[in-house]
Image (cartoon, grey):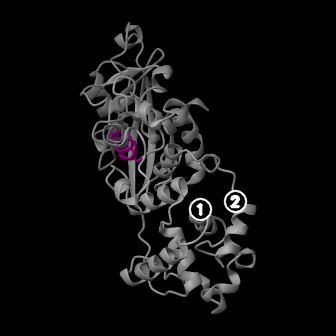
Amino acid sequence: MRQRILSWYRKHKRDLPWRRTRDPYAIWVSEIMLQQTRVETVLPFYERFLHRFPGVRSLARAREARESQVLAAWSGLGYYRRARNLHAAARALVRRHAGRLPEDRASLLELPGIGEYTASAIASIAFGRAAAAVDGNVIRVLARIGGHSGRRDSPALRGAVTAMAESLAQGPHPGDWTQALMELGATLCLPREPLCVRCPASRFCVARLRGSPERFPEAQPAVAPREERRVVLVATSGRRVLLVPDDADERATWTLPYARLGASTASKAARGLLSRLVGNAGPDPDRAGSFRHRTFSHSLTYEIWSVELRGHPASNRPAPPDPKRPQRPGSLWATSHELERLPVRSHTLKALRSLDR
C-alpha cells in the first residue's frame, strides 16, 4: 500500500514551489505559512517572502529585518503570530545553531511556532527523517484506511492513527511519504464525496470496503461562525489614506479604522470613527460599499464608509511617520507605496481593493 501511494504521488502531485527545493529554510517557511491556510492563498506570499528573506540570516538580521519588515512581507496572509514566531525562531537559529535548522524533532520543537506536526513535517521533508506528521488530512486518510472509528478529536482515534502513521513512516523516501499522505487527503480522500475510484489505497481501505468512507472519522458537531457587522472607514487626504494600529493584533499591524456595529447606525459609527481620529471638521463619510470576510470563528460583514478630507495637513505632509515602528500609538497617513511596505490586515486590503474597482 505504501508503495502504491508513493507511485501515485510521484505521478499526480501538484507542482508546488516548496516541492521543487530541498532547502530546509524554504520548506520551513512553507510549513509555517500553510498552518490554517489554503495552498492557493499561500502561493503568492511564499515566493515574495523568500525573495525578501532568502535565508535564515537575512530573516534574523536585526538591522535589515526588524519585526515590522517581516510582518510587512506577511501582510494579507493573516495570523501574524506565525510571522513573529518565524522571525524569533530565525534569531534563535543564528544564536544556537549557526543559522541552520536542526535535523532532529526535539531541537525543532524548541523553536517558536513549531509544534508536533510542523517538526515532523520538516524533519521528514527537509532531512529525510522517519517522522510521522499527523494533521487533519492525515487523520482522515489513515482513519479510513485502517477503519478506526471515533471523532477526529477523540484521544482513542488520535492514538490509533498516530501509531499507524509512525509505523508507515518507517520506510524509504520518508519526505515523499509525508507529502503523499497530505496530497491524498487534499485531493482525493476528501471529507465529503471522496474520490475512491481514483485512490491508490482503495483496495486496502477498510472504510471503503464497509461502504461508508464518509463516516470515518465521525463528523464533529458543526459550530456556526459568529455573525458580526462592522463599519470600516476609508479617510483619504490627497494620495494618503488613514491607518491605525490594530488593537486586535497587539498593535503590531495596521488597519483602516473600524468599529463593531451595535445599537448605533452605520453612519453614526462612521462619523464617530472620523471624529475620534481627526476631529469634527470636514464632511460626513458616505457609504461606499460592503464586503464579507470569514475567519475560523467569525463571519464578518463590513460596510465601507469613505470621506475625502480636502486641505487636511496630511495631504501636504513632507514625510510619513516611521513605518518601522507600527507598535507605537497614533495614526498614520500612508501612500499606496507605503502600504506595500507595511504589515496591513487582510480586511483593510479587501476594503481598499473594492474601492479601486
Q: Tell me if mark 1 has few (under 14), some (14-19) or many (20+) residues whose alpha carbon lies within 10 angstroms of its own.
A: many
Report x, y in % for residue 187: 66, 65
**What amino acid does circle 1 point to?**
Gln
* Residue located beneath label 1 in the image: 179
**Residue bounds of the magenta highlight:** 79-88
Residue drawn at the location 33% of the way across and 18% of the way down: 322
> Which SS class for mark 2?
loop
Q: Nearer the viewer, residue 157 or 214?
A: 157
Residue 311, image x and y in percent? Answer: 39, 10
Q: Is residue 85 magenta?
A: yes
Q: Pick whichever of labels 2 and 1 is earlier in the sequence.
A: 2
Q: Which residue is mark 2?
A: 13
| Contact check, label 2 and label 1, Cβ < 8 Å | yes
C-alpha span from label 2 to label 1: 9 Å
Give the answer, above or below, for where 45 lies relative to 144. Answer: above
From the viewer's perspective, tell me whether residue 228 is left or right of residue 140: left
Instruction: Tell me if residue 159 comes above or below residue 77 in the rendering.
Output: below
Give yes or no for residue 240 being in the magenta stretch: no
Number of numbered callouts drawn: 2
